[in-house]
Image: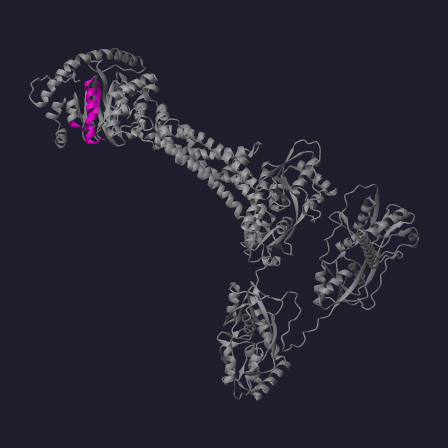
């Protein structure tokens, strides 16, 4: 016990120490200098801007400070929208320097080699707020508030949001707090001071605005903003038309008289502008003989373990790969041609190819589905090989090579083959016209572009041209012998060739057999791998994209489909698309960010790529022309936005793990008149989805909030996504809320409310790193059916299915019998002509259209104005459908009875009716039984389409489970088995019945 | 039984037992004498019915004047009956009468129209033109309740047409009960009687499927009799039977004929026709080609085609 209190005290002491240290660091890092008034601007001493091309980013202080230079014609200024563009202009030497905020420019220089930041800042400014001198109370309060905001990094985040790097901007907007406020503080600003105070989308934004808002949040007052000229900001504070003034980045000098009456708060933001210039980074150092691994790439080294490596026979790649083969790390496939190895890679027969860089680049350029890993495999020099001891020729060759290097011929030759597209082929080596004495036989393996290869029957390439150049220098005739690579050294050795030139590297092994010239060029061995990974939106080309039907992702993907750049697979549910992605049936899925995050969270074998696809707003859709409701809803949305309800609802579903679920929307207790019917597609978490049998989600809570505002009852109708607009249009629903974006196409059919939230479309791809832990069968079983009582979906669904089938069959039998009788009477007696015609028409229509259509027509057309249970609709639709088939079955059953029976009955004096009922029908019934049973079975299975009107039957139960667990197989199989069991039972019953009836005849 | 005197042909009776057939006739005649009285008594019994029926049919809207010499005795009158099936003219003007107690046999090759003629008698086939009068009522008239007419006309089919989904007894009882002719008990009693008469009482609760052809046909006959018809129409009653079973059915029909039932039989059994019929008709080309009592019909056929037919069959 004594120990514990002592440890407690020690712990407390350490904590206190740490906190103090933290405070000091914070304090020292923020200039809490209560300097006097004006904003200081210091001219750069070391770097002179005048006469230079200066690049600045629009909307920054840099722009404001540099502009005067342009106006006085001392410099020319270029304006860029983004820092990245400015930097590119700098590195491409279109401008001499750039001026940016310090933090941005430091980031830029880190990311770009050669960008130097001039130490002496271009300008340093500190910003404070102005108050009237005698408003000491407010001054103290504000300073305290500012200190708090500094401590909790709010100030920093606000500044970063407006003036940070391209990546930081806009990411941390300040959120006005939802609190009780008393009183108002008026802030005077001039709105031409980007990014401190300006107007965007009709609202006041900017660092000054947000900081004051944060202050007001702390002081629990309202913030009001008035706009005035920058000259008058100070005077408006003095004359009390405003409580606080923000000069921001204005360099207006306050008049001394006015200054007397003004006090300044502490600094809330500092702006340091720095200049950066660009110097080209130095060329690479001389290549060494040893192969070195450069630490240039950030990629981890390629792991060959267990892989199959493709190499060209006899090349250095082969030699190195053999090492892996010998120690059993990897398998090696050897190809006589590099092209074959690449081919095998494309066909995924091997995992990678090791090749010289230049040929590799060549291949990769022509094949989009392979890529070179950043980390090279080896770095090496090429040399010519000569017969051991042939010193005379060796010296001559070395001298020739040296000359060719010095006069740039070698470089030109190389560039001619492996330069940029413009350089290639532009300056081919021209054989010189010199006296030649003797022949130089060069052995090569002309299957190694671009060093040596056959082109139009001729052997060309870097090595060949170089050898020609060497021969021109030596005054000898060039003769090329083409042979297999591993024959070259033997040939040189045997004297069949004088020189071997074949992109050969110097190895100790080879040195045993031949001598090498000086190296004439350096090459890298790189690793080529299959690249089908999607890293950016551009990579979508040639891929198969999965989207949910009727969503914005669908619309965007269709563009790709229309111009043939990608294939698109459409799924009715987002979960199905994700499923297909997991099963690698498609390459990627385009989805709204929030649902995408939701899926990715549950599945670690998929991930979202960094580059977003689009950014969009969601709105509610209403029936066209319903302006009254639209206005009400927009007003409600506005209120909910302003009082923070919407953001709290959104955070409750998609905030951080701590925020999630912490602020669920509570339905208010208000008077309600009338019902607002909302159509949604509850398969789009977290906007709308089914949870424990309830339809929940961001959109649903928002709609509840709206209904609370409007004093109406909320009714949710769940249906397929592409049925929503139809439902709203038909008046079956008042509002459609389903994470829907406003598109021109949709606007034709419905009106949209103001957007209530913004979302991103992102691209989900397969996560190669995660091998995916798969559950075993029993775990899957548990997850699909037992977890969260999912089996209930099946049980309840089954009940619905059976009930609908039974009721429909009943109607079908009754109606069908009637129709059959009418038809039979007409056929036999020629009576009931009109009724018969009606029946025939009915039969033709029902049997000539798909049941799905009939169901939809009855739901949307017949029952559009009436509010009936979906089960009634289904029973009516299926009953009518079934009656048509039953009628024909009955009729054929009757016709199958021998005519003599009928005659006998009539001849006994029985009337038509009596004959039919006593004699014919009982016999016909036995005939009909198998066919009627088939009809029942068909009907049972047909009811699976209930999902089209969002009736939760057995099939839909399976779908719901599937969308929750992403396991396609088990729920579907389970549903199929249940249907099968029922059908078997039914068949059994009728077999017994048939047997019993047959007995009667014996 | 035969009542030759009723034959309008006015042929003189020849009582010489010139041949075996004639011998037969004599014995039959004797039987006929005794039967005659019974017949007359029966006729009297039925007469008031007939009269009643006649008056009934007379009271019906379109009742027409009866043709024929002896109103009381003519059961069925056929006048210029015509029937075509599509282009094929089957009946081209048949005129005949069938008197009470008469047994008329229809003989001829297949397709000549005998079945069509028979079926026209109870309107199973509707004639294209012509009149069919049953007990004075023109049954071709649309206003006539054909069901009521058919109650009094029993029909026996070649294919028996027993109702397979009912027991034998039920088969017999069905019509009388359903049409309100008898109560259930009465019908049952009648059925038992009838079954006993044909010796199939043990089959009362059996289903038609378990009976032999001959048994089935006898039940069919008895089923028709349950309605107490005035005339029995037989459409090739033994054509579908094994030779062994033909005998039992023919014997039943013979008994029926002997009891004075008016019958029209379409048959290929020449011997039977000779034995049982009062009159034999040969229909050819849609008309009655020859019509005679059996001994002339079979013994001295006039019509060349009949001669031809008989030469092949006999």
| Residue B261 coordinates in the image, percent (x, y) | 22, 18
Instruction: Tell me what residue is drawn at x 26 percent, y 32 percent.
Output: B87
| Residue A553 to residue A402: above or below | above
| Residue A564 coordinates in the image, percent (x, y) | 54, 56
Numbered circles on residues, count: 0
| Residue A797 coordinates in the image, percent (x, y) | 54, 38
Instruction: Tell me what residue is drawn at x 58 percent, y 51 percent.
Output: A578
Instruction: Tell me what residue is drawn at x 47 percent, y 35 percent.
Output: A881
Q: Is residue A430 visible?
A: no
| Residue A104 to residue A513: above or below | above
Q: Give the range drawn in magenta.
A: B241-270
Name the foreground residue: B314 vs A80.
B314
| Residue A992 coordinates in the image, percent (x, y) | 40, 34
| Residue A304 to residue A844: above or below | below
Name the foreground residue: A386 vs B299.
A386
Is A221 colored magenta in this rendering?
no
Q: Which colour scheme is used?
A: one colour
- In the displayed structure, does residue A808 sit left or right of residue B47? right
Is B249 colored magenta in this rendering?
yes
Position of the C terminus of chain A by quadrant: top left
**From this viewpoint, which residue is outermost toward the front?**
A1
| Residue A96 to residue B289: above or below | below
């Amino acid at each position: 016990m004594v120990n514990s209190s002592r440890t407690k005290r020690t712990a407390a002491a350490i904590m206190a120490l740490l906190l103090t240290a933290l405070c000091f660091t914070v304090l020292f890092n923020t200039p809490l200098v209560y300097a006097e008034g004006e904003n200081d601007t210091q001219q750069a001493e070391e770097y002179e801007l005048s006469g230079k091309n200066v690049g600045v980013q629009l909307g920054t202080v840099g722009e404001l400070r540099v502009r005067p230079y342009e106006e006085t014609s001392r410099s020319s200024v270029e304006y860029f929208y983004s820092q990245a563009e400015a930097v590119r202009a700098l590195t491409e030497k279109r401008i001499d320097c750039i001026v940016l905020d310090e933090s941005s420019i430091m980031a830029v220089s880190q990311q770009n080699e050669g960008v130097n930041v001039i130490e002496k800042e271009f300008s340093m400014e500190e910003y404070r707020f102005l108050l009237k001198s005698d408003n000491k109370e407010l001054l103290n309060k504000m300073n305290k508030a500012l200190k708090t905001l500094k401590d909790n990094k709010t100030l920093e985040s606000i500044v970063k949001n407006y003036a940070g790097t391209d990546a930081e901007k806009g990411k941390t907007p300040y959120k006005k707090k939802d609190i009780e406020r008393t009183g108002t503080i008026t802030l005077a600003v001039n709105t031409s001071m980007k990014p401190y105070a300006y107007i965007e989308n009709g609202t006041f934004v900017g660092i000054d605005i947000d900081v004051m808002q944060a202050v007001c949040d702390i002081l629990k007052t309202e913030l009001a903003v008035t706009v005035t000229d920058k000259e008058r900001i100070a005077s408006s504070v003095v004359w009390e038309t405003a409580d606080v003034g923000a000069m921001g980045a204005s360099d207006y000098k306050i008049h001394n008289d006015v200054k007397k009456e003004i006090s300044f708060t502490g600094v809330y933001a500092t702006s340091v502008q720095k200049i950066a210039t660009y110097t080209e980074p130095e060329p690479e150092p001389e290549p060494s003989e040893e192969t070195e691994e450069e630490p240039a790439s950030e990629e981890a080294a390629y792991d060959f373990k267990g892989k199959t490596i493709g190499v060209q026979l006899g090349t250095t790649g082969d030699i190195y790969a053999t090492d892996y083969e010998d120690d059993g790390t990897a398998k090696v496939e050897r190809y006589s041609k590099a092209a074959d190895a690449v081919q095998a890679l494309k066909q995924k027969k091997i995992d990678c190819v090791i090749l010289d860089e230049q040929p590799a680049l060549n291949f990769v350029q022509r094949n989009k589905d392979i890529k070179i890993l950043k980390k090279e495999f080896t770095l090496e020099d090429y040399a010519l090989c000569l017969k051991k001891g042939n010193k005379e020729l060796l010296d001559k060759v070395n001298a020739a090579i040296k000359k060719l290097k010095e006069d740039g011929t070698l470089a030109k030759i190389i560039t001619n083959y492996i330069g940029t597209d413009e350089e290639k082929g532009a300056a081919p080596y021209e054989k010189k016209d010199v006296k030649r004495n003797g022949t130089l036989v060069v052995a090569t393996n002309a299957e190694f572009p671009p060093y040596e290869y056959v082109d139009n029957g001729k052997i060309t390439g870097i090595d060949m041209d170089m050898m020609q150049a060497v021969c021109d220098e030596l005054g000898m005739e060039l003769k090329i012998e083409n042979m297999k690579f591993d024959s070259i050294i033997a040939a040189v050795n045997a004297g069949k060739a004088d020189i071997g030139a074949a992109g050969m590297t110097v190895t100790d092994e080879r040195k045993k057999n031949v001598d090498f010239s000086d190296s004439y060029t350096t090459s890298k061995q790189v690793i080529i791998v299959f690249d089908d990974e999607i890293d950016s939106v551009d990579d979508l080309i040639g891929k198969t994209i999965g989207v949910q039907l009727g969503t914005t992702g669908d619309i965007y993907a269709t563009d790709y489909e229309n111009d043939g750049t990608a294939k698109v697979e459409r799924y009715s549910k987002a979960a199905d698309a994700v499923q297909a992605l997991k099963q690698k049936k498609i390459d990627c899925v385009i989805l709204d960010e929030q649902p995408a995050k939701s899926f990715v969270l549950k599945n670690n074998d998929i991930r979202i790529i960094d580059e977003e696809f689009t950014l969009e707003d969601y709105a509610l859709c209403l029936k066209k022309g319903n302006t009254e409701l639209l206005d009400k809803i927009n007003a409600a949305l506005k209120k909910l936005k302003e009082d923070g309800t919407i953001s709290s609802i959104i955070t409750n579903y998609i905030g951080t793990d701590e925020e999630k679920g912490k602020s669920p929307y509570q339905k208010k207790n208000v008077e309600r008149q009338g019902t607002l019917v909302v159509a949604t597609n509850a398969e789009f978490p977290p906007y709308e989805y089914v949870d424990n049998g309830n339809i929940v989600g961001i959109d649903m809570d928002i709609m509840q909030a709206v209904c609370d505002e409007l004093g109406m009852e909320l009714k949710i109708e769940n249906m397929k996504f592409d049925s929503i607009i139809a439902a709203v249009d038909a008046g079956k629903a008042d509002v459609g809320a389903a994470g829907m974006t406003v598109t021109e196409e949709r606007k034709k059919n419905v009106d949209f409310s103001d957007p209530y939230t913004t979302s991103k479309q992102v691209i989900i791809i397969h996560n190669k790193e995660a091998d995916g832990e798969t559950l075993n069968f029993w775990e899957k079983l548990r997850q699909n059916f037992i977890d969260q009582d999912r089996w209930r979906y099946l049980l309840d669904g089954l009940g619905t299915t059976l009930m609908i089938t039974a009721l429909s069959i009943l109607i079908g039998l009754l109606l069908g019998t009637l129709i059959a009788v009418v038809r039979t009477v007409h056929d036999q007696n020629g009576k009931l002509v009109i009724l018969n015609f009606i029946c025939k028409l009915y039969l033709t229509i029902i049997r000539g259209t798909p049941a799905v259509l009939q169901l939809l027509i009855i739901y949307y057309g017949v029952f559009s104005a009436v509010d009936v249970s979906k089960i009634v609709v289904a029973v009516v639709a299926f009953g009518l459908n079934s009656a048509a088939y039953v009628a024909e079955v009955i009729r054929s059953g009757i016709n199958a009875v021998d005519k003599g029976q009928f005659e006998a009955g009539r001849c006994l004096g029985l009337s038509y009716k009596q004959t039919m009922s006593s004699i014919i029908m009982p016999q016909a019934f036995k005939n009909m039984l198998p066919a009627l049973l088939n009809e029942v079975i068909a009907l049972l299975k047909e009811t699976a389409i209930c999902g089209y009107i969002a009736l939760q039957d057995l099939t839909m139960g399976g779908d719901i489970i599937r969308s929750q667990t992403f396991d396609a197989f088990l729920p579907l199989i389970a549903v199929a088995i249940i249907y099968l069991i029922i059908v078997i039972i039914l068949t059994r019953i009728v077999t017994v019945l048939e047997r019993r009836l047959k007995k009667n005849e014996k | 039984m035969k009542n030759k005197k009723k034959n309008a042909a006015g042929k003189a009776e020849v009582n010489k037992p010139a041949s075996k057939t004639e011998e037969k006739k004599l014995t039959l005649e004797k039987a006929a004498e005794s039967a005659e009285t019974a017949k007359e008594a029966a006729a009297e019994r039925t007469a008031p019915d007939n009269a009643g029926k006649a008056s009934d049919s007379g009271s019906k809207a379109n009742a027409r004047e009866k043709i024929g010499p002896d109103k009381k005795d003519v059961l069925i009158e056929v006048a210029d009956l015509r029937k075509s099936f599509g282009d094929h003219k089957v009946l081209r003007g048949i005129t005949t009468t069938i008197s009470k107690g008469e047994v008329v046999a229809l003989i001829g090759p297949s397709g000549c129209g005998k079945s069509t003629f028979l079926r026209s008698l109870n309107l199973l086939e509707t004639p294209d033109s012509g009149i069919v009068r049953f007990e004075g009522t023109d049954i071709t008239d649309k206003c006539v309740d054909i069901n009521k007419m058919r109650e009094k006309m029993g029909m026996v089919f070649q294919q028996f047409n027993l109702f397979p989904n009912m027991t034998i007894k039920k088969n017999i009882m069905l019509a009388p009960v359903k049409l309100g002719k008898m109560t259930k008990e009465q019908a049952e009693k009648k059925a038992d009687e009838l079954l006993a008469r044909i010796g199939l009482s043990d089959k009362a609760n059996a289903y038609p499927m378990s009976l032999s052809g001959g048994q089935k046909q006898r039940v069919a006959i008895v089923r028709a009799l349950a309605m107490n018809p005035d005339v029995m129409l037989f459409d090739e009653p033994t054509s579908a039977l094994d030779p062994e079973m033909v005998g039992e059915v023919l014997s039943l029909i013979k008994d029926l004929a002997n009891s004075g039932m008016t019958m029209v039989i379409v048959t290929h059994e020449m011997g039977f026709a000779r034995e049982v019929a009062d009159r034999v008709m040969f229909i050819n080309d849609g008309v009655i080609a020859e019509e005679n009592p059996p001994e002339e019909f079979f013994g001295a056929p006039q019509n060349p085609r009949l001669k031809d037919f008989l030469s092949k069959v006999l």
